[in-house]
Image (cartoon, grey):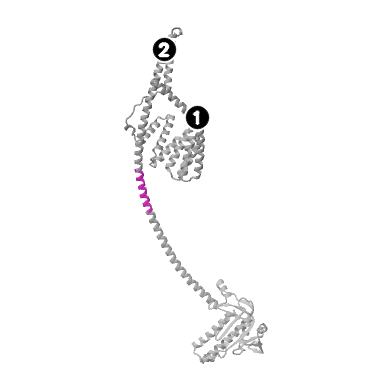
Amino acid sequence: MTNATSAHTMMKTFFFLLTFLSALCLPGIAGGQSSRIQQLETEMRAASGQERVEKLIALADACIQAGDYDKASNWADEAGNFAKRLRLPALRAAALNREGKALMLRGKRKADSRFEQSLDILRSINSGDKSLAMDNLENMRIIAQRAGKEKDVAYINEQIARLNNQLVTQLPQVQAPAPVTRQELDKEIGALQKEIARQQARMPGGKVNAAEMERQNQELQAQLAEREAQIDQMTEDQMKTSMLLMQQRYMLDSVVFRASLDSLSVANWNLALREAETNRKFYIAAIAALLILAGGSLYSFLRTRQHAKVLEGKNEVIKEEQRRSENLLLNILPSLVADELKKNGHTNARYFEDVSVLFADFVGFSKIAEQLKPQQLVTELDTAFKAFDAIIAKHQLEKIKTIGDAYMCAGGLPNGGGSQMRNMIDAAREMQQWLTDWNKQRQEQGLPRFDARIGIHRGPVVAGVVGSKKFAFDIWGDTVNIAARVEQAGEGGKINISGEAYEVIKSYVDCQYRGKIAAKNKGEIDMYFVEN
């Protein structure tokens, strides 16, 4: 009896000290939790990816411990959403568990749905986190018990038993006596007091015998003391039994947990192998597809490059032909007329106020033709005219045409900027000088001489292209006719010019006045020989 009373007294003293120390330490704990939450918030903001999700879950746990269930619910919800985006189902299940706890502590109705979602995710990924699954089931059972849903409670108990693989029944069971609580003791004492009151009521006249009351009180007190001793003794036996049950349950949980870990490890290895095989096949297929695409791209590139080279070659041929056509057209027509003809398909005749016209003709060409063979004659004539072409181009003059052994060119075409008399005189001098040098070589070879008369006149002309086939650029007007008459009135090896031409060049070219010379159909014309 004394031992039971002392043990009971020690237990009361222990709980009192525990309550007192909790009251003393509670502010410090609260302050520590607040600093811990702040630290976790700082770490969470600096983290990313999976680490950020883990920090958010830790924040939710810290807020639950601190009693701030609203923040805990918010942090857990953010962790779940972030884990969903990152495809981390295990962490999302943990976040839903924390959100369910926070909602349950706030008394919200949606708490059980969070636990169910967490369980569904764990089942879908074949997770081996037994503690998280058990925690979800325990919380769901509490919610069902509060709501009085006996069927849900029975179903949840079946799931818990299934999760534990029903291994509890395989261990020796310890029959623990029914616990006797203080409430039951108070009920028994109340019943005894009511019995005393009834005994008092049965006495005659309601008067109470003091000796009888004392005796009954003593008997009741003895019964109460004996009952308390029995309760204390039973409490000690229950504590020993509870300790034994806890040890057995711990051993059972360890065995079940190790077995679960082993089975999960094997399952994870199998999953890893299947995933590796799947990845290997995928990589092989991807590499094959890439090789096919690379081969196709290389083939297309080579074909395109080959076609580009062929096209480039064809373009060069086309450009070369265009250049030849362009040069041929420019050999026939002046550039301005050629551009107009290419653009419009036709040209319009133009009037030029001041143009110089040169005629050159070989003296005694008929006798020369009798001395040379036709082919040789044409060759000699071609040599002379090519030399004239080069000289004319050098002085930026425009060749008009050749008529038999006559050569005709003009200055001041096609831009109409003036007669270019000075250029024309210089060109005529070079033509005569070239013939002089050429005739020296011919005399040494015993060939006949080619002496040319050159006549120059200036005035207005009309220039253009006539006809649609074998067209040629030409000039018309009285200036052309007079230039031809001036050439005919000249002498071989000399340059004969009209008075109109002399008026332009007299200041920088020495000339010899010949007087008025009769010209066919033109009357008398002032003529001058240019000094060589």
Q: Residue at x 49, y 73 (%)?
A: 320
Q: Quadrant of residue 269?
A: top left
Q: Using the image, tell me which numbered label, if any, was put on residue 404.
A: none
Amino acid residing under circle 2 = Gln
Q: First in sequence: mark 1 or mark 2?
A: 1
Q: Which residue is mark 1?
A: 23
Number of callouts: 2
Amino acid residing under circle 1 = Ala
Q: Position of residue 6 (x, y in %)?
A: 41, 22
Q: Secondary structure at mark 1?
A: helix
Q: Position of residue 73 (x, y in %)?
A: 49, 37
Q: Position of residue 307 (x, y in %)?
A: 44, 66
Q: Rate crowding at label 2 as few (under 14), some (14 to 19) or many (20 or more) other CA atoms within 10 Å.
A: some
Q: Residue at x 43, y 19 (%)?
A: 187
Q: Is residue 161 visible?
A: no
Whether residue 277 appears in magenta in the rendering, the answer is yes
**Chain part drawn in magenta:** 266-283
Judge depth for marks 1 and 2 and give the one in front: 1
52 or 211: nearer the eye? 211
Please identify the dominant SS of the magenta region: helix
> Distance of mark 1 from mark 2, alpha carbons?
44 Å
Q: Secondary structure at mark 2?
A: helix
Q: Quadrant of residue 426?
A: bottom right
Vertical placement of 15 versus 204: above or below? below
Q: Which residue is mark 2?
A: 216
Vertical placement of 162 versus 422: above or below? above
Q: Residue at x 39, y 55 (%)?
A: 287
Q: Quadrant of the N terminus?
A: top left
Residue 235 located left or right of residue 383: left
Whether residue 229 appears in magenta in the rendering, the answer is no
